[in-house]
Amino acid sequence: MKVRELMTTNVSYVNPRTSITQIAKQMEELNAGCIPVCDEEKHALGIVTDRDIVIRSISHGNANASAQDVMTENLVYASPDMDAHEAADLMARNQIRRLPVVENGKLVGILAIGDLATQNIYINEAGDALSDISKPSRPQM
C-alpha cells in the first residue's frame, strides 16, 4: 500500500511569519500536534510541533516567536508513492510520529503513525515504529 492511500490530504499549514500563539490556537482547533510551514506556493519549508513551541520558545521566555523561529527546518518527509512500510521505517529511524508528504516540493498530505495503525496489515509496523520513536534520544536525569 502506498502513502497516498493512507495520508490525510486536507492539511492546514502556516507561513514562516505566523506567531506561535496562532499556531497553538490552530493546533487546538485541529486537535493536532504539528503544523507544517509552507511558503505562498505551498512549498514545504519545515514543521512546528507542540514540543518545538515549548522547548524553543516558551522555555526561553520568548512568547513572541514565529514559526520560522521554532520550526524544524531539516524536514523529513515521504512522497505519496512511497511504500507504507518504508514510511514506517522512516518514522522509526527519525523518531517522529507525523510525516509530511511532499510531491514536487509541495505539501500534499501528512501521514501519522495512527494512519498506519488503522490498517490491519500495518499494525506491527506501527507498533514497531512507535516503540522506536518512543525511545529516549539521550539519557534522562
Image (tube, rainbow, N blue to C red):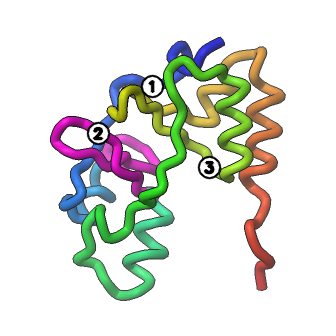
- Disc 2 versus disc 1: nearer the observer: 2
Query: Which residue corresponds to the image point at 67% horizontal and 40% vertical from the top-left?
Result: 90
Q: What element carries label 3?
A: loop
Q: Nearer the viewer, mark 3 or mark 2?
A: 2
2 or 1: tag closer to the N-terminus? 1
- The reply to whether residue 54 is visible in this rendering is yes
Note whether 86 is above or below 49 in the view shown.
Answer: above
Residue 28: tell me if it is visible: no
Residue named by callout 1: 8
User: Residue, x 62% and y 49% (percent of image)?
Assistant: 96
Packing grade of label 1 (10 A; few <14, some 14-19, many >=20) is some
Say above or below: 5 vs 88. Answer: above
Residue 61: quarter of image: bottom left
Amino acid at dot 1 = Thr
Q: Which residue appears at 33% of the width and 58% of the height?
A: 24
Q: Which residue lies furthest to the front in this view?
A: 104
Side of 83 relative to 53 (left or right):
right
Say whether residue 41 is magenta. yes
Q: Look at mark 2 in the image and give the residue it sits on.
A: 43
Query: Mark 3 or mark 1, which is nearer the start of the sequence?
Result: 1
Residue name at image x 45 percent, y 25 percent: 8
**Residue 132 at what x, y percent from top left?**
79, 50
Q: How far, Cα to Cα, is label 2 from label 1?
A: 17 Å
Q: How dense is the environment of label 2, judged by Cα within 10 Å: few (below 14), some, or many (20 and up)?
A: some
**On the image, numbered disc 3 is attached to which residue?**
96
Task: Give the side of residue 49 with respect to residue 18, left or right.
Answer: right
